[in-house]
Amino acid sequence: MALFGLQPHPPLAAFVSSIWLADGYAPGPHRQERILPTGDCSLILDLTQAGKAGVSGPQSESFLIDTSAQFFVAGVQFKPGGAFPFF
């Protein structure tokens, strides 16, 4: 699995903590990954299917994502309150 991250420069850095890209498959005994709760908002784009995207807001509980298949996704991790000007 390849994971690439980019720290944005001003003026975007005031709103965005990171921009990332994940490509690949991490075979192993675990078919799911637990995502811990944060106060951040994320925009996630599925690059294998045109138009498939999701927004995840602040969470108070963890959730599971499926990691059992090939994936190619990109995302923007907003700072707390940073997504407001974009949405």
Image (cartoon, rainbow, N blue to C red):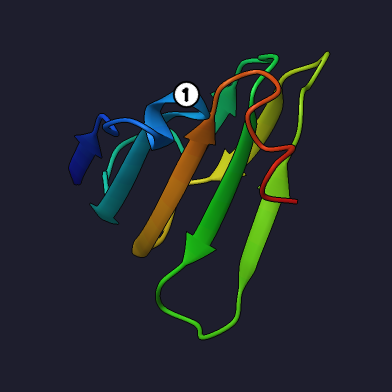
Residue placed at 39% from the left, 55% from the top?
A: 74
Residue placed at 77% from the left, 23% from the top?
A: 58
The picture places residue 82, in percent across and down from the top left corner, at 63, 29
Give left or right: position of 65 versus 25. right
Query: Which of the 4 image quarters holds residue 48?
Result: bottom left
Mark 1 burial class by Cα count in 10 Å: few <14, some 14-19, many 20+: few
As displayed, is residue 29 above or below residue 79? below
| Number of numbered markers | 1
Query: Which of the 4 image quarters holds residue 59?
Result: top right
Q: Nearer the viewer, residue 22 or 16?
A: 16
Give left or right: position of 71 versus 82. left
Residue placed at 74% from the left, 37% from the top?
A: 84
As displayed, is residue 84 above or below residue 58? below
Q: Residue furthest right?
A: 60
The picture places residue 78, in percent across and down from the top left corner, at 55, 31
Q: Residue furthest bottom?
A: 50
Q: Can you identify the residue that label 1 sits on?
A: 14
